[in-house]
Image (cartoon, rainbow, N blue to C red):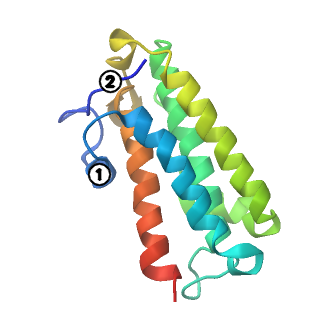
Amino acid sequence: MSGIERPGAGEHHEYFTLYTSKVPDGDVLGTLSTQAGAVKTAFASFGSSGSLHRYAPGKWSVREILGHLCDTERLFVYRGLTFARGDTTDLPGMEEDAWVAGARFDDVPLPDLLAEFDHVRSATLALFRTFDAEVLSRRGTANGSAMTVRSVPWIIAGHVAHHLGVLEERYRS
């Protein structure tokens, strides 16, 4: 299914507008699909040794950013799936720095992380293509805030766009 409308006010925590505002109007699943190629190009351009680069002490490496994108997409897709299936369990939040530290992404070869991102993104697209308008309008609560299933792909696309921007602004020197 395509044509997932942009989420309106009250469909996610207002913080996520930072991300959804970065997504162009139109077919969000098409954006997610083309974005996968942009991620591969951007991250692969650093090469194996360059992907360990941090722009400042205490900041994530390029590999850690890519791993974070995989983890965050999985988390949001889980939220979307949970709510799509009618489960109203209040889902926990995510402490992103702890997740990155615990993952040891710098020990994972860059090609493996790129392949992982492709697999995660393919699974995201396959799932959201099955949701109809009624499913997309379902709501749940994550980290204490209500959100709709429809908001998830928009948040994911915007989150990746945000980090691609950070990669260009701070990691290219």
Give 13 or 63, whichever is nearer the viewer: 63
Instruction: Give the left or right position of residue 140, taking residue 173 as reference.
Output: left
Q: Which secondary structure lies at badge 2?
A: loop
Q: Which label's residue is closer to the chain start, 1 or 2?
A: 2
Instruction: Give the left or right position of residue 145, taking residue 106 as reference.
Output: left
Res 65 visible: no
Instruction: Give the left or right position of residue 73, taking residue 153 as reference.
Output: right
Residue type at mark 1?
A: Tyr
**Residue at image point 40% right, 61% down:** 162
Which residue bears the numbered disc 2? Answer: 3
Q: Which secondary structure lies at badge 1?
A: helix
Query: Residue 28 sits in which quadrant?
Result: top left
Res 27 visible: yes
Residue type at mark 2?
A: Gly
Above or below, 143 relative to 2: below
**Residue at image point 46% right, 29% down:** 90
Instruction: Please give the label number shown on residue 60.
Output: none
Q: Report the quarter where the N terminus lies.
A: top left
Instruction: Please give the label number shown on residue 15.
Output: 1
Separation (CA) of disc 1 from disc 2: 24 Å
